[in-house]
Amino acid sequence: MKNTIQILCFSFLTQIALGQGSFAPSAGQTGSTAMHKDSSSFVAWIDRCTVRRGLQQINDTSLGFANVGDSSDAFGKADGTTVSLGDGGEAIMELSQPVFNGPGYDFAVFENGFTATFLELAFVEVSSNGIDFFRFPSTSQTQVVSQVGTFGNLFATEIHNLAGKYHVNYGTPFDLDEIPDTGLLNKFAITHIKIIDVIGKINESFSTFDSSGKAINDPWPTPFGSSGFDLDAIGLIHVNGINSVKQEKLVLSIFPNPAHDFLTIESNLPISQVQFIDLTGRVFDYQNHRKIDISGLNSGVYFVRITTNSQSYVTKLVKK
């Protein structure tokens, strides 16, 4: 009987730690997608950010706006120093070099949650022109019967595609493949990333909703200067012109450019895939990876994505 009680207690504590959801668990747990700030997958970090603060408490303007940190605190490698967005506040990052849709995750967002269950959430959107932004489809399986309090608990297994899923030093990764294709978004030339604080209040007057239309419940109210999502950093994984894996440097020669009928690609590494992407997002795959017949393509500008076994590169091509 004693052993049975111990097993039941362990199971109960595990459920408390992991929650009951169907998504990846907290950092350190089997199956977690959390990315540590020291991961070799990161090849760059954001260095430009514009912040629009939200109120400390959305239904009480007398408290003023969030005020901890400034935009520069989101620059560089994650270090626990943050800029607080407040209820519904946002930060827009203009990238020095475009992020592109490579194999697996393309970037990760870091927050400074101090435990695996004290989590403050945010929506993530991307743009390839700085005007039209598209949101990652998000899911919250957190109950909406009662409000999660100021220092209440959330569980990573109940959260998908919301920044802040993981605690300090661990980034929440995002894969551009998960955003539906549209002619207004070039996934191979992402120039801006936007972070928007989730207002976790489940009262319908102030609620924010996941992609299914369900209210998202997260710690609320947070009536202090560090209100809302605390942006620590954004680590970039697939950046045009930078190798995504620190292995042998990829050396490419692509000519002629502009091209009419044939394009030649010379590489020091074996090429596994060549794709042409037009400005509407349509993808054209080619099997011949050295001398490519492009006579069937319409005239215009294309992005050429060249993939080896370990890294990817994207360049621009003009088809005559």
Image (cartoon, rainbow, N blue to C red):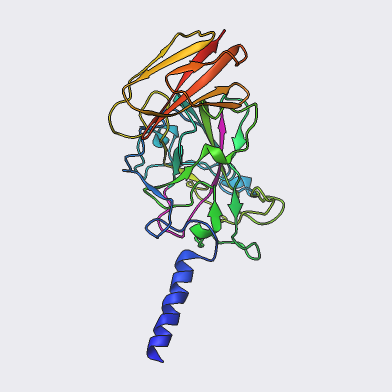
Q: Position of residue 96 (x, y in %)?
A: 43, 23
Magenta highlight range: 112-127
Q: Position of residue 220 (x, y in %)?
A: 57, 56
Q: Position of residue 178 (x, y in %)?
A: 57, 41
Observer able to see residue 219? no
Is 64 located above or below residue 218 in the figure?
above
Is 306 located above or below residue 168 in the figure?
above
Determine whether, in the image, residue 127 is placed left or right of residue 207.
Answer: left
Q: Quadrant of the N terminus?
A: bottom left
> Nearest the camera: 22 or 86?
22
> Nearest the camera: 186 or 285?
285
Q: Quadrant of the C terminus?
A: top right
Disc tally is 0
Determine whether, in the image, residue 289 is placed left or right of residue 285.
Answer: left
Give the residue drawn at x 52%, y 57%: 23
Pick out the residue farthest to the right: 205
Prevalent SS, magenta region: loop
Determine whether, in the image, residue 33 is placed left or right of residue 243.
Answer: right
Where residue 302 sits, quadrant-wise, is top right
Give the residue drawn at x 61%, y 31%: 133
Q: Position of residue 109 (x, y in %)?
A: 45, 42
Is 9 located above or below residue 70 in the figure?
below
Residue 218 on the magenta span: no
> Nearest the camera: 264 or 105?
264
Give the residue drawn at x 46%, y 23%: 288
> Nearest the camera: 158 or 55?
158
Observer able to see residue 135? yes
